[in-house]
Structures are given as C-alpha cells and as structure tokens.
Image: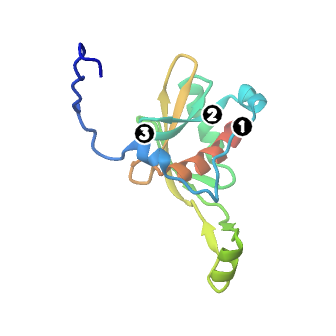
C-alpha cells in the first residue's frame, strides 16, 4: 500500500439472519447440472429462472394479474395439483409429485464399490407455495417456498421451477 494512503476501514454493517444465499448458490449436485438455455431459446422465452433475495424465482414477462390467472391454470395439470388458493397473499399451495429419477453410477470405482448398494434416487415431490410478486410494469416474479414458507434449496427449486416454466411458456 502506498505511504500516502491509509487502509480502508472494513466492518460489517449488519447481519441478515437465516440462509446465506451465496452459500446456497454454491451448493449443488453435479449429477443434476443446472439447466441452461441456448441463446436463441433464452431470447424467445417469456420466462426465466433467476436468483434473488429469496433464492431462485421465475421471472415472467407479463403483468401480475395475468400471471396470477395463468399460474392457476398451469398449476392444476400433470404433476401439480392446487391444494389451497390464498388470493390476498397471491399464493398457491401446490402438491407436486413426479417419478423419481435414478442417478446413474458414473465411474468404474463407484460401479464396483456401490454394486451391492441400492440405487440413488432424486425425488423433489412435496408441497410448495408459489407467490406472485410484482417486479416491474412488464415483469412479475413467481417465488417458490416450501410448505412452511421457507426458502427452497437451489437444486430442488430449480427442478420444480423448470417444470412450472414449461407450463407457463
């Protein structure tokens, strides 16, 4: 450091209780890599999965009232079933069920050592809450929470939101 400059004062301003979102972002499972759209797909998409203060969310290019209406139709199909509608909070409580995904054993060592063990499954079935939040005049957030209203872990949120994104377009 130059002689004529002093070292800047470094101090925490405040602490936020709960999850450390950068730590959540670093957690992951290489057996289920994140889904990445091609540039052409991303440009055509009317929704995208983004990272915010409450973890992952779905950003939709539409106004909140329209997203709320479309979400009601999208959630009651296939793997998702609406259990409860909370219009004052703009939340849906949804049961999500999908067929478990078998994780393949990749390396030779894993195949030999884990030969006798049961296969691993990925199953993100459960109850979720989706909340419609106005973001700007042109975009709306669809935040995802677990049954108790807590932040959903990244890989789980990404999986469920990607299924919802396919329905919303």
Q: Earlier in the sequence, mark 1 or mark 3?
A: 1
- Residue in the foreground of this view, choosing between 32 and 7: 7
Residue under label 1: 37
SS type, badge 3: loop
Residue placed at 63% from the left, 47% from the top? Answer: 34
**Contact between labelled residues 2 and 1, with CB atoms less than 8 Å apart:** yes
The answer to whether 111 is drawn above or below residue 47 in the figure is below
Instruction: Give how far across and how far down residue 67 sits, in percent.
Output: 59, 30
Pointer 1 or 2: first along the chain:
1
Q: Residue at x 57, y 61 (%)?
A: 125
Direction front: furthest residue: 3
Distance, label 1 to label 3, CA atoms, is 22 Å
Q: Residue at x 36, y 47 (%)?
A: 19
Q: Is disc 2 in contact with disc 3, using a CB cutoff of under 8 Å?
A: no
Give the CA distance from mark 1 to mark 2. Answer: 9 Å
CA distance for labels 2 and 3:
16 Å
């Amino acid at each position: 450091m130059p002689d004529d400059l002093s070292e800047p004062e470094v101090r925490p301003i405040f602490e936020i209780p709960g999850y450390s979102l950068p730590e959540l972002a670093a957690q992951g499972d290489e057996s289920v890599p994140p889904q990445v759209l091609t540039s052409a797909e991303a440009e055509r998409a009317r929704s995208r999965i983004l990272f915010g203060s409450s973890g992952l969310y779905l950003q939709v290019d539409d106004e909140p009232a329209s997203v709320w209406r479309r979400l009601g139709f999208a959630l009651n199909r296939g793997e998702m079933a609406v259990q409860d509608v909370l219009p004052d909070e703009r939340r849906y409580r949804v049961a999500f069920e999908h067929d478990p995904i078998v994780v393949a054993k990749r390396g030779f060592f894993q195949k030999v050592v884990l030969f006798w063990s049961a296969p691993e499954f990925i199953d993100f079935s459960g109850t979720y809450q989706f909340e419609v939040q106005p973001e700007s005049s042109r975009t709306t957030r669809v935040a995802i929470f677990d049954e108790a209203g807590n932040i959903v872990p990244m890989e789980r949120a990404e999986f469920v939101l990607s299924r919802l994104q396919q329905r919303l377009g």
